[in-house]
Image: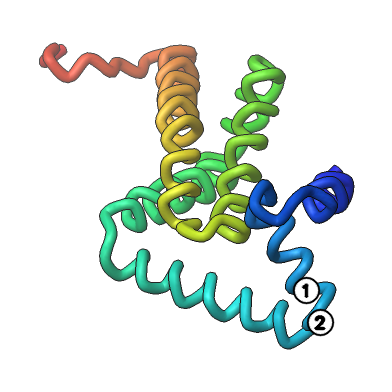
């Protein structure tokens, strides 16, 4: 699909082309040196944004919390996947979209962080709900902090 869009955009008038069309033309004309230059420039921009924008902290916190939640506590993500299969697929899509935005967008940190805003908070909420439900199922466990029982 991406290749089709690149082909289409490449054959439009230069003033109508997007970044993809212009970059495709540059790569076709210059080859590997152009690709390496694009990667270098995007990396430099993302490093600069990581240093100076609050979005980098949001991105790192979101990705870090989701990475932890996929492995700990054991079985919670499987329970969410079984209970909410479509929502779980959406979380995977948001995470993948965030990674792709980071890699391919000029300001990848900002695009990735704003994408993760739609995935991380609901996922954290569902994990907390699953943990609460699991704790309530255990007999003899009381979780009301206001009660001194």
Image coordinates of residue 144 in percent, x first then y, are: 22, 14
Asked whether residue 99 is in view, the answer is yes
> Residue sitting at 74 percent across and 72 percent down?
26
Residue 126 against residue 68 in the figure, above or below: above
Image coordinates of residue 2 in percent, x first then y, are: 81, 48
Drawn side of residue 16 relative to residue 11, left or right: left
Q: Nearer the viewer, residue 58 or 12?
A: 12
> Residue sitting at 65 percent across and 36 percent down?
92
Residue 133 against residue 78 in the figure, above or below: above
Q: Which residue is mark 1?
A: 27
Question: Quick one: label 1, few (<14), some, or many (20+) residues within 10 Å?
Answer: some
Q: Which residue is mark 2?
A: 31
Q: Quadrant of the N terminus?
A: top right
Q: Quadrant of the C terminus?
A: top left
Q: Nearer the viewer, residue 6 or 136?
A: 6
Q: Nearer the viewer, residue 42 or 22?
A: 22
Drawn side of residue 92 relative to residue 105, left or right: right
Image coordinates of residue 19 in percent, x first then y, are: 63, 56
Q: Nearer the viewer, residue 34 or 145?
A: 34
Asked whether residue 131 is in view, the answer is no
């Amino acid at each position: 699909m991406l290749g089709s869009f690149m082909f289409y955009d490449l054959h439009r008038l230069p003033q109508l082309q997007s970044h993809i069309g212009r970059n495709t033309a540059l790569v076709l004309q210059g080859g590997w040196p152009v690709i390496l230059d694009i990667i270098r420039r995007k990396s430099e921009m993302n490093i600069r944004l990581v240093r100076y924008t609050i979005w980098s902290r949001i991105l790192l916190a979101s990705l870090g919390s989701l990475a932890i939640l996929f492995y700990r506590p054991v079985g919670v993500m499987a329970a969410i996947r079984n209970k909410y299969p479509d929502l779980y697929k959406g979380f995977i899509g948001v995470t993948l979209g965030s990674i792709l935005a980071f890699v391919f967008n000029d300001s990848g940190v900002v695009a990735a962080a704003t994408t993760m805003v739609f995935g991380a908070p609901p996922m954290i909420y569902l994990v907390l709900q699953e943990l609460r439900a699991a704790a309530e199922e255990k007999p003899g466990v009381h979780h009301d902090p206001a009660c001194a029982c």
